[in-house]
Image (tube, grey):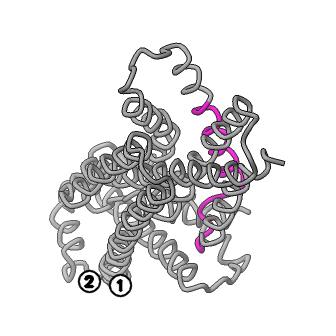
């Protein structure tokens, strides 16, 4: 019974966080994989701490939390680098899953080594340790999401946002500091737990508000520009948009048939982005409606033609249009989700 009690907070928290994922960005399979990764990271840390023994002595309460956060960050870094975490909510869900998996094994090991624990102690410790691990991992995952965003901006030859980079560093430092404070500062357990969890909640809430503003800017600004570009292409008024004027400026550098392919490539890229973002906005507004078979077939046909043109265009042409077709992690995620939906 004590084993069930100590694991209950993890199950409740992960289930609750998953239910607030309105965009359905995290599948049950991925969530289970991250919980398993958390279990493996806990096993790795347990083995490492057994090998080092009392090497760190009185500093173990400081060193161990730092090591744990670094190890837990490994699967999250893999997800972030593969663009599987591009929004705040999915980074929190997946980070909490890794932290939850870690705390599951830690709680089990704690119970196995001390069979004198009572019901209340097992419940409180299960809640306390689980929330600390899940909260810290969620903060780390959010920081890694911001870092990958800035790496993508740099790869797309865009200016790195100093505010985002600074926020990522702050979150990494804060998550580790909170974990260290929880382990090293021994005062009233209840007050300590409430303080640490309260600070985590404030960090996540502030980051959520900041990220929400960034996403709305991403949608509003880019959507307007893309719709203007589509209108200018379809109506033959390329000289009325900055993108169109840029395309006209390089027109003489390519044979007519290649320039035509470039225009088609830019048009397909923009159309797919607009549809993907429109679908994203519908999910955000809570509008769940299935795409018709005709719409699915049309989107998949455009995507196939887009991929074909991407391969057919020469290196010079691709370099020429690269500044116009900047795929942010959120763009890639929205388009990937749209294509998966059309294929399902």
Q: 248 or 161: which is nearer to us?
A: 161
* Magenta-drawn stretch, dominant element (helix, strand or loop): helix
Helix, strand or loop status at disc 2? loop
> Relative to the observer, which residue lies in front, 258 or 124?
124
Question: Quick one: 120 or 127, which is closer to the camera?
Answer: 120
First along the sequence among labels 2 and 1: 1
Q: Is there a contact, CB below 8 Å, between mark 2 and mark 1?
A: yes
Residue at 50% across / 38% down in the picture?
A: 72
- Where is residue 207 drawn, in percent x and y? 36, 66
Residue at which label 2 appears: 237
Residue picked out by circle 1: 231
Question: What distance separates the C-alpha of mark 2 from that of mark 1?
Answer: 8 Å
Relative horizontal placement of residue 98, taking residue 119 as reference (left or right):
left
Which range is magenta? 22-42
Residue at image coords 76%, 34%: 115
Q: Is residue 308 visible?
A: no
Nearer to us of marks 2 and 1 is 1
């Amino acid at each position: 019974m004590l084993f069930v009690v100590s694991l209950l907070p993890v199950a409740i928290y992960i289930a609750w966080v998953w239910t607030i994922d309105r965009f359905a960005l995290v599948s049950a399979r991925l969530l289970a994989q991250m919980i398993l990764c958390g279990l493996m990271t806990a096993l790795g840390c347990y083995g490492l701490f057994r090998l080092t023994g009392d090497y760190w002595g009185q500093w173990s309460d400081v060193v161990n939390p730092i090591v744990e956060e670094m190890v837990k960050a490994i699967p999250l870094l893999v997800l972030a680098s593969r663009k599987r975490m591009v929004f705040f909510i999915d980074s929190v869900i997946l980070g909490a899953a890794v932290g939850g998996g870690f705390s599951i094994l830690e709680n089990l090991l704690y119970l196995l080594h001390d069979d004198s624990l009572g019901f209340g102690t097992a419940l409180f410790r299960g809640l306390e340790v689980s929330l600390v691990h899940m909260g810290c991992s969620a903060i780390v995952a959010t920081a890694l999401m911001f870092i990958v965003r800035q790496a993508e901006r740099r790869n797309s030859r865009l200016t790195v946002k100093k505010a985002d980079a600074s926020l990522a560093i702050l979150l990494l430092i804060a998550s580790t500091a909170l974990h260290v404070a929880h382990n090293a500062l021994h005062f009233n357990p209840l007050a300590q737990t409430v303080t640490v969890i309260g600070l985590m909640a404030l960090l996540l809430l502030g980051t959520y508000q900041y990220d929400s503003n960034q996403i709305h800017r991403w949608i509003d600004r880019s959507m307007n520009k893309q719709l203007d570009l589509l209108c200018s292409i379809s109506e033959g008024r390329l000289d009325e948009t900055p993108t169109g004027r840029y395309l006209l400026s390089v027109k003489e550098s390519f044979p007519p048939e290649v320039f035509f392919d470039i225009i088609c490539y830019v048009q397909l890229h923009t159309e797919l982005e607009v549809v993907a973002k429109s679908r994203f906005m519908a999910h955000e507004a809570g509008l769940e409606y299935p795409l018709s078979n005709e719409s699915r077939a049309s989107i998949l046909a455009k995507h196939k033609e887009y991929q074909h043109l991407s391969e057919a265009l020469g290196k010079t042409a691709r370099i020429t249009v690269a500044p116009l077709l900047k795929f942010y992690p959120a763009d890639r995620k929205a388009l990937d989700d749209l294509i998966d939906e059309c294929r399902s």
